[in-house]
Image (cartoon, rainbow, N blue to C red):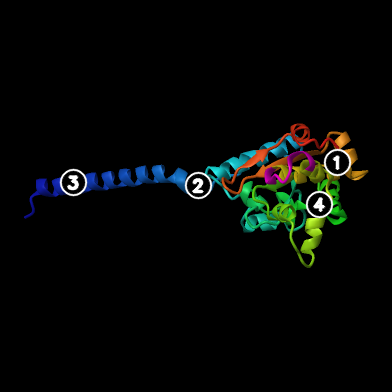
């Protein structure tokens, strides 16, 4: 005959063990669940230039501090944008492989309308692309981003023989009035010439009539200069007026 008291003790001990095990599992799940959640992209209304700029600045800060969320980079976003696009900003920057707007601003598919050429140079084709993004897609902000250690500007300053269409890049830089002003007052200063090239891009966009000039006049579009540092990953917001005064480039 089994001892009834002994059986009762065993059942009681087993119940306690199961209760403790379940409590531990629930606690572990509560601790881990926040870390397992997919980070959500903060909803920001980018319909105004100020809001669009704020979103870019916040994204770059996340990138610099190793907290990128990589939003809008999945199959769901592909489906969301398969029939339309509404980029909140236009980014004009260099083709340099170290300057990737969606990465440095922590954005994804359908967020940015990007135009890249060596030295962030613009012709009628690039200006037409900006017009399209602003007039037809509703972008409220255009940023012109130069970057430190720009190879195109270095080639312009170093001179020497070039071949093929690279010659046109150097020639275009050499014809920019802002660069001529800087050479006259500051000499072959790489940082100054990079900033001068950014200023020239601003001049081109702001003088693009009637499409862009009208949007700017009505306060629906802002054109902002920025500088990307390839050493730190940080994008610095520049002040156009200060740059023009600093480099005697008041055009």
Q: Helix, strand, or loop for circle 3?
A: helix
CA separation in Å, label 3 and label 2: 36 Å
Indicate which disc residue 13 carries: 3
Disc with the residue nearer the chain's start (3 vs 1): 3
Label 4 or label 2, whichever lies nearer to me, is 4
Query: Disc 1 marks which residue?
Result: 206
Q: Helix, strand, or loop for circle 4?
A: helix
Q: Is residue 190 magenta?
A: yes
- Looking at the magenta stretch, what is its main secondary structure? helix
CA separation in Å, label 3 and label 1: 80 Å
Residue at 89% x, 40% y is 213
Indicate which disc residue 110 carries: none
Instruction: State left or right for residue 165 relative to residue 61.
Output: right
Residue 37 vs residue 113, the one in the foreground: 113
Disc with the residue nearer the chain's start (1 vs 2): 2
Disc 3 crowd, CA 10 A, few/some/many (<14, 14-19, 20+): few
Query: Disc 4 marks which residue?
Result: 174
Indicate which disc residue 37 carries: 2
Tell me where the magenta segment starts and ends, as one range.
Answer: 184-191
């Amino acid at each position: 005959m089994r001892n009834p008291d002994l059986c009762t003790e065993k059942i009681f001990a087993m119940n306690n063990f199961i209760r403790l095990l379940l409590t531990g599992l629930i606690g572990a799940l509560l601790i881990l669940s926040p870390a397992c959640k997919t980070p959500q992209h903060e909803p920001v209304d980018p319909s105004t230039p100020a809001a669009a700029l704020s979103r870019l600045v916040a994204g770059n800060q996340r990138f610099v501090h190793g907290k990128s969320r990589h939003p809008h980079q999945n199959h769901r976003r592909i489906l969301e944008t398969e029939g339309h696009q509404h980029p909140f900003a236009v980014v004009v920057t260099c083709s340099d492989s170290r300057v990737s707007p969606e990465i440095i601003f922590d954005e994804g598919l359908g967020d940015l309308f990007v135009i890249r050429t060596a030295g962030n140079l613009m012709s009628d084709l690039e200006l037409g692309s900006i017009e399209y993004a602003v007039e037809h897609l509703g972008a409220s902000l255009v940023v012109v981003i130069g970057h430190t250690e720009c190879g195109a500007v270095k080639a312009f300053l170093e001179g020497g023989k070039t071949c093929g269409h690279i010659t046109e890049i150097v020639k275009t830089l050499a014809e920019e009035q802002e660069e001529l002003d800087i050479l006259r007052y500051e000499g072959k200063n790489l940082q100054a010439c990079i900033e001068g090239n950014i200023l020239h891009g601003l001049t081109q966009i702001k003088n693009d009539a009637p499409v862009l000039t009208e949007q700017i006049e009505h306060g629906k579009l802002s054109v902002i200069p920025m500088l990307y540092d390839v050493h730190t990953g940080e994008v610095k917001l520049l002040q156009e007026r200060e740059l023009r005064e600093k480099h005697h480039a008041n055009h």
